[in-house]
Image (spheres, grey):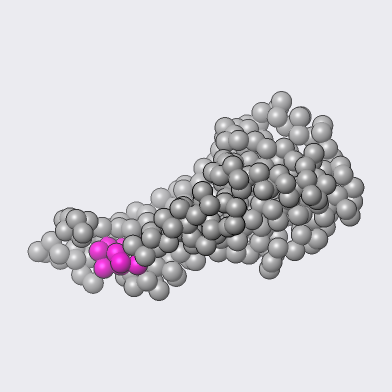
Amino acid sequence: MHLARLPGHKILVCHNITPGHFFKRPGMEQMASLGDDCDRARVQLASMHHMFDIAVGVSDYNALELRQLGFRNVTTIPVFVNTDFFSSDQLDSTTFNAIRSKSTANIAFVGRFVPNKAIEDVIGVLAQYKRMFGPDINLHLIGKIWDQAYYSSLLAHAAQNGVLDLIRTHIALEPVKLKTVFAAVDAFVSMSQHEGFMVPVIEAFAAGCPVIARNAGAVGDTMGDAGFLLADANTQLAASLVRMLSLDSGLRERVIAGQRRRAFHFRTENTARRWLNTLHGADTRRKPDGSTRP
């Protein structure tokens, strides 16, 4: 492989590759090829372990996988997240007022509309909330449609559960409107089954939006001890937490305070410092003849 013959230090940064089985569902054959691509990419990643001087996982979850694949000098450096912007006072008042005027309770999910995100389980939280507390709630889905069949299946699932009219879809919101949604809703809810980091969690933390998330992939690494981390897709528990957050301002303030402390860990300055230390370490590993120490 040409990459192996290139001179100089080589650093691999792994955000994770979604396992292909998530894209291989009956009735969604168009996505099956994407699953095959993911499977091939994971095989290729394993074959490259000897080519890099340093391997960086954006979470401890990813770093562990790299070590298991045989990569050496593995470290964890998180994704750069613009926490300063998401913690600022900048909002779109029209978007904020539109959300708050439509329903008393609001939840949101941010991410690609793909099967591993398990958006059907977020819709399940919405349905549970309606059954337990009434229909005065909206779910805001924010992301990009990768496969029309999967997106249609989500709408069908919502219709079967009697909550289709409670869903608001926002395609690729600009940053200030995304930040406004975080500020306007009662909670960001994720039931994703596989994540390499999950940037929206930290964006929500910084924006002051309580997070309720399933503990899958790297989500636990990213959240730390902040927010509500669920052991599984317990939609009834998640709906109850949404209700508590919408009614108990003291609880909400305590959760937000803990999340802001966690978001500080991901400030640009902190991440940049870790990169500088890693790059300096790579330079010190170079031998006088230009090769690198193991």
In-image side of 160 versus 50 (left or right): right
Q: Quadrant location of the N terminus?
A: bottom left
Find out whether residue 56 is within the magenta segment: yes
In the rendered image, the residue lying farthest to the left is 289
Q: Quadrant of residue 169?
A: top right
In-image side of 104 versus 209 (left or right): right
In-image side of 152 versus 54 (left or right): right
Query: What segment carries the magenta color?
Result: 46-57
Residue 91 rendering spot, x and y as whole percentages: 65, 31
How many marks the image carries: the answer is 0
Residue 16 rendering spot, x and y as whole percentages: 45, 59
Q: Residue at x 70, y 63 (%)?
A: 233
Q: Is residue 96 above or below residue 280?
A: above
Q: Residue at x 59, y 57 (%)?
A: 26
In-image side of 41 versus 281 (left or right): right
> Can residue 136 be seen here?
yes
